[in-house]
Image: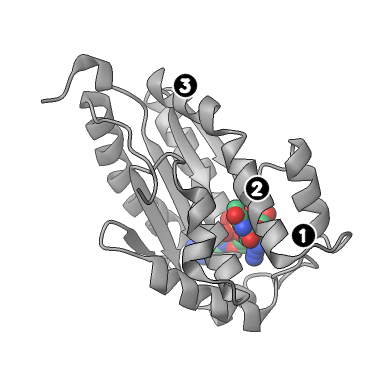
Amino acid sequence: INKESDSRGALIVLEGLDRCGKTTQCSRLLSHLEELGHSVESWRFPDRNTGVGQMISSYLANKSHLDDHAIHLLFSANRWEKRSLMESKLRSKTTLIVDRYSFSGVAFSSAKGLDLEWCKAPEKGLLAPDLVLYLDISPEKAAERGGYGDERYEQLEFQKKVAQSYRTLCDSTWKIIDATRPVEDVEKQLKQIVMECVLTCQKGKPLSQLWE
Ligand code: Z5A
């Protein structure tokens, strides 16, 4: 039985390869929910504004070098430093549209060869998303979209390994969206799935934790 106190915002995560269109779709979802009068915020990980986020940003820009395990833990710490704020936002009925989350953490680090279970461990206890939207595109097609920049990981061969890691992580609860379709088509499909999830959480759904 759902209690009134379980009414809350939804935790919605967008995942996918570099240039799959997450940023584009997050901002469209944000506007759509705002127009409907919902309390909603758009978040992204890494959050480059925190102290940890600045270390990550410098690593991604190839301005610093870190052991693969160390950077993995920093990405995770970056989510932990936002965990309590995330919970209070959701409990105060604000929906969060989040561009990348723990699945990126595990997919990118395990693509480097780190053990999958080791990668998942520091994510345990973070809030579990109510919805994971995977914007599906081949690494080759993604690379055609304006090409890659200079950041670490923005290379075709590596992105192929990341795609493989995502396939390992993906479970039946994920919604797989064909991200090669026109922006408006993807948007239409996402809006429908997201609205269903927002309404379910509004009616009342307990929060749960990731991988526990
Ligand atoms: N990382 C990690 O290792 N561990 C972690 O725990 C986390 C992340 C959280 C940070 O990336 C890097 O950190 C990332 C993973 C790793 N590395 N990589 N690769 P970021 O968040 O700063 O960058 P990104 O997520 O890769 O974002 P992006 O490059 O901005 O891509 P996007 O947000 O998915 O796509 P977009 O900007 O919306 O669109 C890309 C282009 O495609 C743009 O020109 C659009 O106009 C175009 N586009 C979008 N949709 C379409 C459609 N449907 N058709 C045609 N063209 C389109």
Q: Position of residue 24 (x, y in %)?
A: 55, 51
Quarter location, residue 171: bottom left
Which amino acid, by three-letter code, is at mark 1? Answer: Leu
Residue under the image location 40 percent in, 66 percent down: 169
Task: Work out which residue is located at the far left of the displayed protein and give it.
Answer: 1
Q: Position of residue 192 (x, y in %)?
A: 28, 45
Q: Within 10 Å of the Cα at label 2, are there few (<14), some (14-19), or many (20+) other Cα atoms?
A: many
Q: In the rendered image of this protein, does residue 174 appear above or below residue 108?
A: above
The Cα–Cα distance between marks 3 and 1, rounded to whole angstroms, is 30 Å
- In the picture of the structure, the residue carrying the numbered disc 3 is 88
Q: Cβ(mark 2) to ligand 1 < 8 Å?
A: yes
Quadrant containing ligand 1 reads bottom right
Choose between 170 and 145: the one closer to the eye.
170
Question: Earlier along the polypeptide chain: callout 2 or callout 3?
Answer: 2
- In the picture of the structure, the residue carrying the numbered disc 1 is 60
Question: Earlier along the polypeptide chain: callout 3 or callout 1?
Answer: 1
Which amino acid, by three-letter code, is at mark 3? Answer: Ser
